[in-house]
Amino acid sequence: MYSNLHDLAEAKRGALMTLESFVLESLREALAQGFFLPGEEINEKELSQALKTSRMPIRQAIAVLEGEGLLVRIPRRGTFVTEVNAEIVEEIYAMRIELEALAVRRAVPRMTDADIARLIPFTAIRPETIATIQQHIEMNHAFHEALYAPCNWPRLLRQIQQLRTAIGVHLIHRGKFSPEREEASIREHRALVDACHNRDAERAEQLIRQHNENAKEMFVRYNL
């Protein structure tokens, strides 16, 4: 696990970022890719060895991720990957529904033809080509990132990303969705793209609310 984290981090090391950002993004991506299980303890010593850094930037990164809800510190026990329960899932999706509705409501009237063109390839994806849950998460993230980007509110986009990652950390360990659920998700994406093409922000907002309600129902069914 920590050796895999070392390999992931080495790929990032050449990027132009501060040490603190490098450690934070490496750990955040490790969580998103399922390097750690929900409830697993985070070992600061092994992290510092894997990332070839002192413990100070490790602790700073942990504090940030704790604030984002991805990690939880338990006094006299340690730091652990957050485990979700029904109440946490309800809170996350309630926030996502409102924030993503706001993002799409603001984004649609500002979309250019090029913005919509970036969404179209996601409507042609076939469920049988999505072999793993990680592929689903990456495809889904890329679609929603492109969908919301024209809203051009970076704070809103960061908050949405954090909430989506908080769910993705748990989905990554599922294995694979059923072809039926994959097809339903892609069909919902197609409807959203049609609404964007028609510049119908009200319809797009309705669709994104229902899309997230469906995602919540699926998460509760298979993860709680």
Image (tube, rainbow, N blue to C red):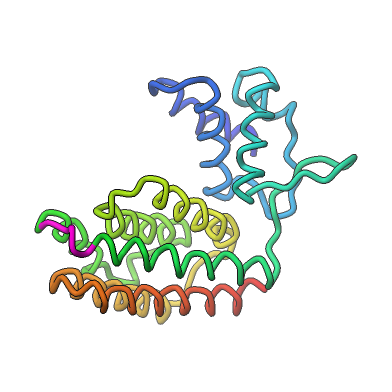
In the picture shown, does residue 89 fall above or below 118?
Answer: below
- The residues colored magenta run 108-112
In the picture shown, does residue 65 fall above or below 58?
Answer: below
Residue 188 versus residue 203: which sits nearer the camera? 203
Residue drawn 11% across and 54% down?
Answer: 114
Q: Does the magenta-highlighted stretch encompass residue 111?
A: yes
Residue drawn 52% across and 65% down?
Answer: 95
How many numbered tags mark residues here? 0
Quadrant in which residue 172 is drawn: bottom right
Residue 105 versus residue 12: which sits nearer the camera? 105
Residue 181: where, in percent of width, then height? 42, 78
Residue 122: where, in percent of width, then height? 25, 64
Q: Quadrant of the C terminus?
A: bottom right
In the picture shown, does residue 182 fall above or below 38?
Answer: below
Q: Residue furthest left?
A: 113
Q: Does the magenta-highlighted stretch encompass residue 62?
A: no
Residue 175: where, in percent of width, then height? 54, 64
Magenta span: helix, strand or loop, mainly? Answer: helix
Residue drawn 74% across and 49% down?
Answer: 40
Residue 5 versus residue 119: which sits nearer the camera? 119
Drawn side of residue 62 relative to residue 155, left or right? right
Residue 145: where, in percent of width, then height? 33, 54
Residue drawn 26% across and 76% down?
Answer: 202
Q: Quadrant of the N terminus?
A: top right
Drawn side of residue 195 relative to residue 67, left or right? left
